[in-house]
Image (cartoon, helix red, strand yellow):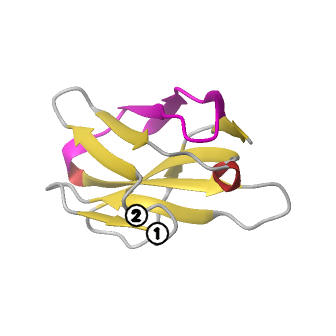
Amino acid sequence: QVQLVESGGGLVQAGGSLRLSCAASGGTFSSHVMGWFRQAPGKERELVAVISSGGNTNYADSVKGRFTISRDNAKNTMYLQMNSLKPEDTAVYYCAARHIATTTFDYWGQGTQVTVSS
């Protein structure tokens, strides 16, 4: 079982930056694809960014050029650097993991709130 704990959320003004972290334990971190998801009030959860075990990345169009996903396999930690934040980025952000042999994200963190004021 993989346990995930997010940190780094908070309140920031539009145009500002935040860095989220996701600490993983209980599994082989380097054998998992990692992702950041978010869910805004009244909306469905959406994929923000994903990073493979080897470091390949993909982003939602809405965050391309503003957010950067990264991972440190030695520290069992994933990050999401968020720049040029907009009010529409306001959501609960979740980290998630799936083993490289599976196709669904089976492990989830508890979420961290990001609020961007205008």
| Residue 84 drawn at (x, y percent) | 49, 46
| Residue 70 drawn at (x, y percent) | 27, 44
Q: Nearer the viewer, residue 59 or 65?
A: 65
Q: Is residue 6 left or right of residue 90?
A: left
Q: Is residue 115 visible?
A: yes
| Residue 38 drawn at (x, y percent) | 61, 54
- Tell me the mark number nearer the camera, choosing from 1 and 2: 2
Q: Is residue 92 above or below residue 37?
A: above
Q: Is residue 22 above or below residue 33?
A: above
User: Disc 2 designates what residue?
Assistant: 64
User: Disc 1 designates what residue?
Assistant: 60
Q: Quadrant of the N terminus?
A: top left
Q: Nearer the viewer, residue 37 or 85?
A: 85
Q: Nearer the viewer, residue 18 or 102?
A: 18
Residue in the picture at 36% in, 59% down? 65
Q: Quadrant of residue 59?
A: bottom left
Residue in the picture at 60% in, 45% down? 93
Q: Nearer the viewer, residue 5 or 15?
A: 15
Residue in the picture at 47% in, 36% down? 4
Q: Which residues are magenta?
A: 1-30
Residue 25 among magenta residues: yes
- Whether the residues at callouts 1 and 2 have beta carbons within 8 Å, the answer is yes
Residue situated furthest right in the rendering? 42
How far, Cα to Cα, is label 1 from label 2? 6 Å
Name the residue type under label 2.
Lys
| Residue 9 drawn at (x, y percent) | 59, 30
Residue 33 among magenta residues: no
Name the residue type under label 1.
Ala
**In terms of secondary structure, where does tag 1 sit?**
loop
Q: Quadrant of the C terminus?
A: top right
For the residue carrying disc 2, how many other residues have a C-alpha within 10 Å: few (<14), some (14-19), or many (20+)?
Answer: few
For the residue carrying disc 1, how many other residues have a C-alpha within 10 Å: few (<14), some (14-19), or many (20+)?
Answer: few
